[in-house]
Amino acid sequence: MIRLPKTLRPTHYEVRLQAFLEGSFSIEGYVKVEVTALVNTHHIFLHMVDIITINETARVVDRGSGEEHRILHQRYNAVRSMYVVEVEEELLEGRNYSFSVSFVGTLGVRPRGFYRSKYTKENGEERWVAATQFQVIEARRAFPCMDEPLLKATFAVFLARREGMTALSNMPLRASTPMEGQDGWYWDEFERSVVMPTYLVAFAITDFPMRVVAGRDGSFTLIRAWARASVGDQLEYGTRVAVLGLQVFEKYFGVAFPLPKTDLICPPEMSPNAMENWGLITFRESGLLYNPARSSASRKMWVCYLMAHELAHQWFGNLVTLAWWTDLWLNEGFATYLADVAVDQIEPTWGMLDIFVVSRLQTVMVYDALRTSQPISQPVRDPATINEIFNNISYLKGASITRMMNHFLTDATFRRALTDYLTTLQYGNAEQDDLWGFLTRAGHRDGTLPGNLTVKTIMDTWTLQRGFPVITVKRTANTTAVVKQEHFTLENPQTSPHSWWVPLTYTSQEHPDFSDTSVKLWLSCKDPEGATTEIPYPEPGQWVVFNVKQTGYYRVNYDDENWALLTRQLEEDHTAIHVTNRAQIIDDAFNMAKAGRLSYRVALGLTGYLEKEREYVAWRAALDNLQHIYYMMNRDPAYGALKHYLLSLLLPVYRSLGGLEGGEGTVPDQLLSGELVWWVCRLDHPECVIPALALYRSWMANPEEIRSVSTNVRDAVSCTAVRKGGEEEWVFAWRRREDLKDALACTQEIWILNRYLDGAFNSSSGIRRQDAANTFRSVAREPLGALVAWNYLRAHWTRISEYIGASFFALPRMIEDVTRSFTTTLLLQELEEFERRHKPDGGLLTARGAVAQAVAATKVNVAWVQLHRQGIVDLLASRGFSSDLASLSE
């Protein structure tokens, strides 16, 4: 275990740091921590990494009497990252003490702890800045501390800076005074902070100008935005979202934002996309900068969502903090869902709560349907495990079950419970059972939760076990049907001990109501697997849809009659079914077929109506599932038949939206247009490829005319040109890589792909360390690139993992992307050998779980080819899409 003994509780820190951004890149520091003894003890335990204490400066003082305690020993346990001070006279329970020590450290190059990174000014001058990334357990790299979320305290921060630089921390600047004996240096003292954990403490020292300042009406909160000078004009949209987001969340939670200011800043290097430090939120530039003339609709949506996510944390995580990392999902799942709620209010035309179904819920179900999936709430014992649980399960499944609670309790009850929770526990810590208590009391008080159920009873079945159920609905008589739940997996079905409390919702053709998401029936987790429950059912010939707006975290399978009725309804008038349920019907059908529970004839039959579909959400569900078949068959002899089938679905809508000239209208319209252009070009149709090449080459001839290519199709145009072109097209994209970095991975030249991968893991290449993983992932997303990237990963894993480090998402997502199209036993064997070679001694770092998932997913893919490939070929042939050579001459 890495946790400190429960002998002392910190109450306040004084931290003084002088960081040298030239020469040695060293840190000279001093920390004083005030503590209360919880038991009698002779020891003070602090976390510390890559720090050397100046032992003769250490002092232990009784704050009541002023008496100094003699220190007997100071020692450091590197395995536990623990600095231990032993005093001669016992520290007594209930008394207050202070411990202080001076120390030295280093501004590292990896974005963790207190680190350095550089950028190049427009005049070619390189400048260094310093920033922090303390989540999860990296504050101990900046100063000795009790680095656990439960051990909250206040902080007084003093940062030394050179003249011409700006220092920032969580709180406003209190005073700035010259340093004695050091010309040009100043001590910046910041106001005493609110009570918070060490992982939310933050510093930054930069030469960035402050480009945007905003205040909120009726509030004293000041919002400032900082970035390097050349991109400062792209801060306006993100800052506006910050102003609106704080207003949305104050109203939603009924709890005021407690800080007088919030700074938004983009260090040149970041590990996560953003970090919710109280009062000093850090972002990658891609998460905060938005240029209306050059940025796509998807970039605008990302900036808005990410800002809302970090602001949601100001309450869920900052005001009330998890007691330990086991309940990480309370932070990340709630912030993910509530961010989409806020975006829906900030940008109401986007339909963000509908997009949730395809971007969050359906995405994570793919991972959660493997037997290697993990519960949301997981025991955490070591640092690698902590970073490993920053994954899709914590974020996306956490968000999906939070949304499910919102619907089965009703929004009004849910919000009242959150207000009570945040008000009662503010500045404290909580576990998931604490939240369940507040939600249960609100649900019983409002009558939205049955009196014989508690939220804990229900939600423990969703958080303490992996996976989710499939609900099977079968008619048994004219007006009755039976429903049952089973554990849904994509692997061979087996008897499973898992069952859930399932909130069933449904509507029918006779009286369709897609606005009513109230629970019609609770399926009990106490029933044995396969046990059936009888329900009333509409007359024959009337369709039913279960899981209204897909608010429940489960899949649904029907009898053949109902699937046929739904298919006919979509063909005759698809608008009779809400768009989220159209997406759900498509996604459930394809996953039922993938798992062998439904014929692919039914699943593919549902796609026939798509030429009339104009909603992004429904198309996104269809394309995500068709992409799986594309990955399974893109190197298959029958790929040509699949390609022409896909084009038959895509071209009518592609043409109706204007092809490369489209991409206007609402943000969802722009997203749909971009997706369709990407696919039609990817499938090499001349209506896309020829104009894309012409546009790109016209741009090459006039490099400053970037506006000649619409922002929402620029990625598809550039990727197509690089893929169909040669070295010249690739070099043009490289020189404009801030706009075209994804296109660089589209080349079919293997030597260029390998050179590009080499550059990704070389700090002198021009590719920033923070972009290394995404560079690899962009190569791995296409079939040819996946094989190149896989061979590169196997050959250079140690160097890659050392270069990136144990950051939250980088290594796991690289593994996910590079193995997604694996379909052969040879690739499976290579993957299993990779796991055997690197798993011992923690060599997989944060990718341990992702590799296990990849092995399981590859086994599913290999089985899919054996079980379904021929059936798909036959189905395509029956529709006139033949894979025979003879068909080429017809």
Image: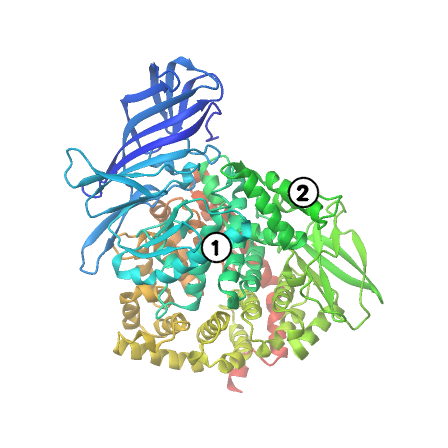
**Number of numbered discs:** 2
Name which residue lies at 63% across and 74% down. 875
Which sits earlier in the primary sequence, circle 2 or circle 1? 1
Q: Which mark is residue 247?
A: 1
Amino acid under disc 2: Arg
Q: Is residue 710 left or right of residue 513?
A: left
**Number of other residues with Cα within 10 Å of mark 2, as a class: few under 14, some 14 to 19, many 20 or more:** some
Name which residue lies at 55% across and 60% down. 356
Which numbered mark, 2 or 1, is in the foreground of this view? 1
In the rendered image, the quadrant that contains the C terminus is bottom right
Extreme-bottom residue of the structure: 890
- The correct choice, above or below, for 178 with respect to 817 in the image is above
Can residue 24 be seen in this snapshot? no
Q: CA distance from mark 2 to mark 1?
A: 27 Å
Q: Could you say which is closer to the camera, residue 366 or residue 57?
A: 57
Q: Which mark is residue 441?
A: 2
Determine the image quadrant of residue 864: bottom right
Name which residue lies at 45% across and 51% down. 310
- The correct choice, above or below, for 738 with respect to 612 in the image is above
Name the spot of residue 324 as percent of width and height, x first. Answer: 51, 36
Q: Is residue 830 left or right of residue 485?
A: left
